[in-house]
Image (cartoon, helix red, strand yellow):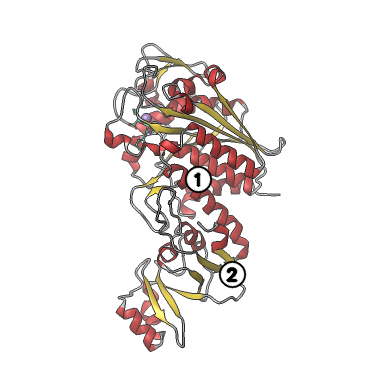
């Protein structure tokens, strides 16, 4: 695939096909203004300026232009150009008479294809957009690249993306960004991250569990810790999932992909933070030595956890990683995880559930999400439900007995491992599009990444 940086270019008056943006309220006037052949072409194609509608119009002497329906020409969304970027032929384009605004991002995101496993690549050549806001190009390209990174990692089947390959992905980003990375496995893992080791120990040697870390930035800057659930495949363990529930579980490292992509954005933009990324990477497999329902694990923090269900594995590995992150008292701690089916039952596929112990942080994240069309919905860390995690034998259990408020009890479990006084937000995200939307093809996707990034940019402006 063409480098993303080649798809968005400064407008220097070069030859380009015009894209006319039209909304319903302006449609009649626009149509009346068109020269006869263009008007007839628009009508023949049934163009009524419905959102995402596209019509090809003949030029006055030669060439052609395209008309594009948008919801509101005065308030462009990031997705307004996505469908056009997807449908139009290879070439160079310019939005007529105005800036493409936030549409530049969707122009890039709409050209994503995952073709690693196809002999016949069906992607066409690059659709290049010119913009009169060159200052916006670098940032937009970095967000698109990071989104593509999430999509590629999530879409890659578990057979080709186990803990070792996830480690490779972190190391590649570390190298690209001049960060240090380090991976703990084997006996050191069992000692320092006992719940990561326990969850991952049923996997084959080649796919052994590990804790992948990346560190970057000036010691004097405030600490930012990012944690991501890296379950490269979730069979459910001995509490094995039924086929339908297991089918998509290659995406259970989606949280790790989000955290890594966010770390990449932080480093590429050179934010004044001291970054600590932690990815517990495991395969939740089945074998004679798998951890069992009823087993009691001692966490890094020292709290004992009775395993009520081996399919609630994400919170176990995150707990040890959050504990480690908290030991350095970060100013801000964010975690991303495909943690519960319950979050999807509550909010559906498109709205990540946001949990936070800090109202200001939650408010900023919600506002950012709304502003840049990466919505989140806040759910409560409802203290009274903590008792649902009580265990007869251990300090706590990893699941509630009743299948109620499942994403809340999962978040409350995590909170037990976050030190008081550390501002923390937890994203329970789907990391997946079950059906294609403009700019967002079916398959792995980043949900909540841009909202988080926006808040980091607000909180840590450069110099
Ligand atoms: N990875 C799953 C959660 C999941 C399932 C996310 C489907 C997105 C789509 C997680 O490890 C899990 O299995 N959670 C269980 C928890 C339960 C056993 C308390 C769930 O949600 O059913
Ligand atoms: Mn599970
Ligand atoms: Zn899982």
Q: Which mark is residue 365?
A: 1
Question: As displayed, is residue 336 above or below residue 371?
Answer: above
Crowd band around label 1 with a 10 angstrom C-alpha radius: few (<14), some (14–19), many (20+): many
Q: Are marks 2 and 1 in contact (CB under 8 Å)?
A: no
Q: Which residue: 35% across, 15% down? A: 294
Q: What residue is disc 2 on?
A: 132
Question: Picture quarter containing residue 222?
Answer: top right
Q: Which residue: 39% across, 45% down? A: 432
Question: As displayed, is residue 442 above or below residue 13?
Answer: above
Res 238 seen here: yes
Q: Position of residue 34 (x, y in %)?
A: 41, 85
Q: Which residue: 59% across, 60% down? A: 137
Q: Position of residue 138 (x, y in %)?
A: 61, 57
Q: Name the element at disc 2.
A: loop
Question: Picture quarter containing residue 380?
Answer: top left
Q: Position of residue 413 (x, y in %)?
A: 43, 26
Which one is in front, 66 or 232? 232
């Amino acid at each position: 695939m063409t480098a993303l940086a080649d798809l968005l270019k400064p407008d220097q008056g070069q030859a380009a096909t015009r894209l006319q943006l039209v909304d319903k309220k302006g449609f009649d006037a626009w149509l009346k203004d068109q020269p006869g052949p263009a008007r007839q072409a628009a009508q023949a194609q049934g163009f009524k300026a419905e959102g995402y509608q596209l019509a090809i119009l003949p030029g006055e002497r030669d060439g052609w232009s395209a008309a594009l329906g948008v919801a509101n020409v005065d308030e462009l969304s990031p997705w307004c150009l996505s469908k056009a970027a997807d449908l139009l032929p290879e070439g160079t384009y310019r939005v007529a008479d105005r800036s493409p605004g936030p549409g530049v991002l969707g122009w890039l995101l709409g050209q994503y294809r995952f073709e690693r496993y196809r002999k016949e690549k069906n992607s066409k050549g690059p659709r290049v957009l010119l913009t009169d806001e060159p200052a916006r190009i670098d940032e937009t390209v970095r967000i698109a690249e990071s989104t593509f990174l999430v999509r590629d990692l999530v879409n890659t089947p578990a057979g080709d993306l186990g803990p070792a390959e996830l480690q490779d992905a972190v190391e590649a980003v570390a190298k690209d960004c001049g960060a240090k990375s380090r991976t703990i496995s084997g006996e050191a893992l069992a000692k320092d991250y006992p719940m990561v080791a326990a969850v991952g120990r049923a996997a084959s040697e080649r796919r052994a569990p590990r804790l992948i870390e990346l560190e970057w930035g000036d010691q004097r800057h405030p600490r930012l810790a990012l944690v991501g659930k890296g379950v490269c495949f979730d069979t459910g363990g001995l509490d094995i999932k039924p086929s339908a529930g297991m089918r998509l579980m290659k995406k259970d490292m989606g949280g790790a992909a989000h955290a890594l992509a966010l770390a990449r954005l932080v480093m590429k933009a050179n934010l004044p933070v001291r970054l600590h990324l932690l990815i517990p990477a495991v395969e939740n497999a089945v074998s004679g030595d798998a951890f069992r329902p009823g087993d009691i694990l001692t966490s890094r923090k020292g709290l004992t956890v009775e395993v009520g269900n081996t399919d609630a594995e994400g919170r176990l590995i995150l707990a040890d990683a959050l504990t480690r992150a908290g030991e350095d008292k970060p100013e801000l701690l964010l975690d991303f995880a495909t943690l519960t089916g319950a979050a999807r039952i509550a909010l559906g596929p498109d709205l990540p559930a946001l949990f936070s112990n800090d109202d200001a942080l939650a408010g900023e994240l919600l506002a950012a999400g709304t502003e840049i069309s990466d919505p989140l919905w806040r759910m409560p860390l409802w203290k009274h439900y903590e008792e649902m995690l009580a265990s007869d034998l251990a300090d706590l259990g990893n699941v509630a007995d009743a299948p109620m408020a499942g994403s809340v009890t999962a978040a409350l479990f995590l909170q037990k491992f976050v030190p008081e006084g550390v501002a923390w937000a937890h994203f329970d995200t789907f990391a997946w599009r079950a059906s294609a939307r403009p700019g967002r093809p079916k398959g792995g996707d980043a949900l909540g990444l841009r909202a988080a990034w926006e808040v980091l940019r607000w909180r840590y402006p450069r110099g």
